[in-house]
Image (cartoon, coloured by chain):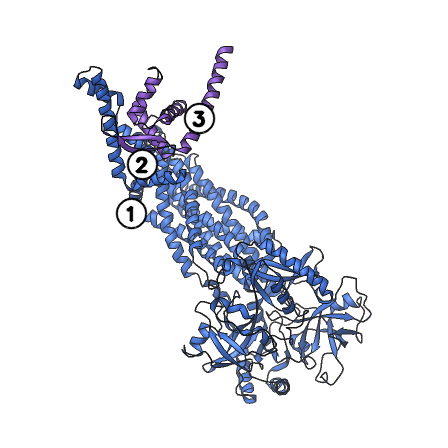
């Protein structure tokens, strides 16, 4: 209760000050009267008694003041006073104020923006979901397929039968939500548009009061919930939408609900436009009917913990259930466990890509904030010299050091508060900035929104306080250290680059330079890494190779019609003038769409007890290797003859040969896939399949004709321009089927840039922006220190000139001081960068975090910038008029 | 603004709390009582008394209430809070330890 009565008293002294003061008066009055009566009773004369009583009490005003101090009223009084005074000071020095606020706004705004991205994408990505703070990600892990060296398990998806078992057996978890992103093409108005959808468990919309049909029965419930956007765009906000139908993947779906505005599904990166029940899986998810197959792991799920349950407790429980399943179904579940992860560590959506990008960016903007703060610190210090007169007087009439500190910190707080408001505005404008990096294929807009909620506000307020302390404390302490006699001597008589207060400012500049250098090195490293990626060979052609796709599923084709269409289309595409070759493939390299993956058994290969050989594969058409530019080391390509009527064949890659046939030529050997025997007819050179960073892995190809898929990509090798081909292709497809729209035609290079290079590009762009900002701020800081030093040592410079120093001498004098500061800063920066750049080594591709070229480049940029910053002050030094300088 | 040194301040707090512990008193009464009980040895500096009272109240050791004095005038009475009683006990123990220690030093040397 003590804190409560204390708080009540504080509030009373603060809010009802007059009453408190009056009571104090009355209390002291009573004391005097009592004392007077006491003296009177001892026989003193009335006047004398009154005088003696007053004397015994002492100075009444002083007592009152002291009592007020005890009640902490003065603190607020002073604060108010300082606030008023601070605003007046800022108003009187608009140049200084604008400069300082601008620096801080950039620093704080950058931090607020990046934190709002982290909030909106990683920490609380699904604002429309109830209790998202209790939502965790459910991923499977496979200890057998994991990394043998680090003992790190590989993340997998989950199978539906397992999911049902977890749902039945985990008591600490409120609900499980199964979710799998997929896509289809729908027509919006008169254009075909690719939209993302989700196959979800029936309880997905329970919080909204929409129950998404039953989970049983194969393809039995063609119903869908559509997004608010689709309702507006496709159905023009039709109020009687429920009950209408929409064709999805060629099947009529009854619309049973519209998701509320602002709900984009539970996938970080792309907005989901429609949801269908899990029983419709076969229609949307390639690879056949999976709901009864414990070995088909495809679900990306979430779990909502019961209130008060920690993720560790739930983890323990679900692992126990997973162990039971391992024992119960050793054939499918051996080695498979489940991990619960916080939303920001989700391995299956945009969070994977954004996490490293945003952590690096957060570190970078913090450095920018440090640089901005030291700049403002510098400015404040310059101004405190100008205010020395005022400060000296304050001290002389008895202001304590603490009181002075309070005043200067209040002034700093005013600056940073204004900057925070500006910074939040910056964050608000930038909340959609990240979308720019996600060049939308065919008009789909990425959903990567920063979220400005109370957490971001609290974060910004924290940044504001911390930065105030960072930039205002040192100058305030400095300003308080005036020695009254010494301040009569002005600094204009000092020697150039002399010690004293200038030293702290020099230290600040050195810090700025070193921080800036670290950012420059990081930017240089990442740019270099990106260059390496751009020029590195993925194992297939990137130029003169075009890629596009079309969705026969959405157009309602069945397999027979689709095969016929594909054959006719390929004949015509190959006949387009300028086309060297063309080939279909189910998956194109470096795409989100996963390859098929199955367990295989290789004839003649002895497996280790725990080993379960499996490899990813792609379904490809004839001419694929020629079109992609992947050379065959032995054997032959697939041809039109490899169809469903002939023997099953496969082409394997080098790694597979090494792993399963001890490097011997495997032509004619066999392996089993899904219970069927495949004969190896060729060996392909290694290529990158999913990303540049991947380790070489076993991979093989099977003919599309023998493993048919309705969704394929079309790859065309040609030296002609993509737009020209796109026109020909659209016409061609239109001739074959006027309801079918081709996808966007892009070069393979563009495709890779969009998928594999995106996070690299984001980091590079963000780091370049912030690195540039840091460089600018550091240069301004250096410029400020140098020109101040020049203006303060005019007398010395004048004297030197009078004694015959040439302008070049003076320039050298000033520049050498600037170079010294830069040099020390760079040395410190090198040391810092050597330890810090290792932290983002994962983002670097074939570049050492200590790459000398990057360090050299950063050094070059830094020294050029600082020379430029010092040049003008140096030039001004040569314009010193010796006569005037000596006379002043 | 001359502040009493720690020792004096601590001692004054102790005396004030102890006096109030017996019965609620107004400021003047506190000063009188301390003087009486100490056989006129301790003269409380009245200038320091009121800041001390206000500080103790802010810290929650004592609370105040307006009441009637002996000669029917409005006066502010201070009384001990439970937290204050605890604090007083602690302070008293500390003081006892200190005075025993000082006695020891004075007798031995």
Alpha-carbon span between mark 3 and mark 2: 29 Å
Q: Quadrant of the C terminus of chain A?
A: top left
Viewer-closest of A434 and A103: A434
Front position among marks 3 and 2: 3
Q: Quadrant of the N terminus of chain A?
A: top left
Front position among marks 1 and 2: 2
Mark 1 Cα within 10 Å, few/some/many (few <14, many 20+)? few
- The hue of chain A in the figure is blue
Q: Which mark is residue B15?
A: none
Viewer-closest of A586 and A558: A558
In the rendered image, residue A341, in percent from the top left (x then y), is placed at: 58, 58
Left or right: residue B66 compared with residue A131: left
- Residue A631 in sight: yes
Name which quarter of the figure residue B20 lies in. Answer: top left
- Please, which chain is the residue tagged with disc 2 on? A
Q: Which residue is mark 1?
A: A91
Say whether mark 1 and mark 3 are on the same chain: no
Viewer-closest of B93 and A663: B93
Q: Which residue is mark 2?
A: A74
Alpha-carbon span between mark 1 and mark 2: 25 Å
Q: Secondary structure at mark 3?
A: helix
In the rendered image, residue A472, in percent from the top left (x then y), is placed at: 40, 42
Left or right: residue B28 compared with residue A582: left
Q: Which chain is purple?
A: B
Q: Which mark is residue B91?
A: 3
In the rendered image, residue A402, in percent from the top left (x then y), is placed at: 37, 34
Please, is residue A640 above or below residue A847 in the view? below
Name which quarter of the figure residue A343 lies in. Answer: bottom right
């Amino acid at each position: 209760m003590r804190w409560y009565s204390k708080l009540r008293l504080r509030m009373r002294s603060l809010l009802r000050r007059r009453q408190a003061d009056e009571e104090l008066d009355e209390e002291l009055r009573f004391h005097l009267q009592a004392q007077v009566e006491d003296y009177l009773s001892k026989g003193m004369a009335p006047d004398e008694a009154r005088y003696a009583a007053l004397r015994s009490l002492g100075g009444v005003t002083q007592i009152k003041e002291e009592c007020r101090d005890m009640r902490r009223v003065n603190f607020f009084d002073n604060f108010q006073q300082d606030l008023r005074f601070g605003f007046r000071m800022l108003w009187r020095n608009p140049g200084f104020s604008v400069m300082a606020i601008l620096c801080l706004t950039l620093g704080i705004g950058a931090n607020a923006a990046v934190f709002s991205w982290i909030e909106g994408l990683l920490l609380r990505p699904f604002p429309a979901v109830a209790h998202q703070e209790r939502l965790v990600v459910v991923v499977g892990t496979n200890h057998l397929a994991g990394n043998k060296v680090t003992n790190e398990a590989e993340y997998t998806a989950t199978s539906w039968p397992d999911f049902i078992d977890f749902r039945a057996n985990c008591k600490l978890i409120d609900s499980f939500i199964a979710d799998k992103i997929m896509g289809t093409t729908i027509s919006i108005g008169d254009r075909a548009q690719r939209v993302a959808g989700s196959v979800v468990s029936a309880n997905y919309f329970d919080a909204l009061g929409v129950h998404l049909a039953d989970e049983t029965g194969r393809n039995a419930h063609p119903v869908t919930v559509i997004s608010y956007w689709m309702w507006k765009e496709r159905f023009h906000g039709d109020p009687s939408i429920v009950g209408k139908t929409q064709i999805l993947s060629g099947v009529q779906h009854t619309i049973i609900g519209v998701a509320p505005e602002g709900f984009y599904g539970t996938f970080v990166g792309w907005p989901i436009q429609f949801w269908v029940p899990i029983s419709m899986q076969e229609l949307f998810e390639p690879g056949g009917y999976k709901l009864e197959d414990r070995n088909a792991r495809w679900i990306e799920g979430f779990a909502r913990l019961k209130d008060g349950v920690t993720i560790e407790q739930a983890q323990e429980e679900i692992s126990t259930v997973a162990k039971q399943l391992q024992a119960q179904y050793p054939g499918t579940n051996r080695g498979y466990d489940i991990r619960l992860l916080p939303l920001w560590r989700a391995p299956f959506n945009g969070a994977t890509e954004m996490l490293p990008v945003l952590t690096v960016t957060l570190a970078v903007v913090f450095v920018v904030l440090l640089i901005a703060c030291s700049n403002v610190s510098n400015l404040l210090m310059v101004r405190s010299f100008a205010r020395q007169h005022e400060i000296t007087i304050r001290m002389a009439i008895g202001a304590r050091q603490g009181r002075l500190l309070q005043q200067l910190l209040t002034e700093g707080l005013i600056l940073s508060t204004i900057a925070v408001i500006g910074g939040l505005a910056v964050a608000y404008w930038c909340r959609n900035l990240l979308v720019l990096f996600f060049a939308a294929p065919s008009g789909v807009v990425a959903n990567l929104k920063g979220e400005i909620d109370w957490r971001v506000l609290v974060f910004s307020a924290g940044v504001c306080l911390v930065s105030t302390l960072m930039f205002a404390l040192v100058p305030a302490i400095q300003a308080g250290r005036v020695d009254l006699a010494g301040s009569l001597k002005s600094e204009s008589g000092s020697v150039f680059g002399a010690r004293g207060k200038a030293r702290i400012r020099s230290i600040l500049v050195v810090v700025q330079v070193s921080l800036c250098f670290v950012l420059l090195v990081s930017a240089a490293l990442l740019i270099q890494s990106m260059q390496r990626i751009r020029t590195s060979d993925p194992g297939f052609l990137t130029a003169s190779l075009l890629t596009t796709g079309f969705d026969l599923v959405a157009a309602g084709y069945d397999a027979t019609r689709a095969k016929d269409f594909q054959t006719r289309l390929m004949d015509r595409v190959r006949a387009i003038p300028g086309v060297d070759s063309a080939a279909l493939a189910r998956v194109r390299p470096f795409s989100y769409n996963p390859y098929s993956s199955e367990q295989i058994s290789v004839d003649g290969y002895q497996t280790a007890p725990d080993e379960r050989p499996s490899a990813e594969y792609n379904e490809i058409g004839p001419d694929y290797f020629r079109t992609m530019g992947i050379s065959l080391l032995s054997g032959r390509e697939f041809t039109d003859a490899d169809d469903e009527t002939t023997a099953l064949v496969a082409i394997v890659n080098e790694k597979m040969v090494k792993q399963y046939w001890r490097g011997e030529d495997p032509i004619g050997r066999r392996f089993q896939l899904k219970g069927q025997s495949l004969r190896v007819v060729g060996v392909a050179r290694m290529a990158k399949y999913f990303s540049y960073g991947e380790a070489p892995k076993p991979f093989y190809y099977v003919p599309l004709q023998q493993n048919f898929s309705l969704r394929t990509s079309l790859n065309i090798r040609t030296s002609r321009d993509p737009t020209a081909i796109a026109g020909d292709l659209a016409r061609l497809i239109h001739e074959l089927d006027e309801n079918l729209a081709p996808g966007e035609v892009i070069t393979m290079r563009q495709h890779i840039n969009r998928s594999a290079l995106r996070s690299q590009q984001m980091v590079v762009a963000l780091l370049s922006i912030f690195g540039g900002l840091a460089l600018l701020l550091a240069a301004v800081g250096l410029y400020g220190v140098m020109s101040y030093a020049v203006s303060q040592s005019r007398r010395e410079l004048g004297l030197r000139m009078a004694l015959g120093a040439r302008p070049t001498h003076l320039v050298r004098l000033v520049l050498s001081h600037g170079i010294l500061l830069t040099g020390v800063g760079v040395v410190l920066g090198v040391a810092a960068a050597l330890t810090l750049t290792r932290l983002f080594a994962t983002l670097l591709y074939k570049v050492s975090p200590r790459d000398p070229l990057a360090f050299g480049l950063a050094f070059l940029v830094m020294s050029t910038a600082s020379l430029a910053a010092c040049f003008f002050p140096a030039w001004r030094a040569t314009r010193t008029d010796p006569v005037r300088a000596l006379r002043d | 603004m001359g502040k009493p040194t720690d020792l004096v301040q601590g001692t004054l707090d102790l005396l004030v709390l102890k006096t109030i512990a017996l019965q609620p008193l107004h400021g003047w009464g506190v000063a009188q009582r301390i003087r009486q009980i100490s056989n006129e040895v301790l003269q409380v500096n009245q200038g320091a008394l009121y800041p001390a009272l206000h500080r103790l109240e802010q810290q929650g050791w004592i609370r105040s209430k307006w009441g009637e004095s002996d000669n029917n005038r409005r006066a502010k009475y201070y009384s001990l809070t439970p937290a204050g009683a605890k604090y007083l006990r602690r302070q008293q123990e500390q003081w006892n330890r200190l005075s025993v220690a000082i006695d020891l030093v004075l007798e031995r040397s």
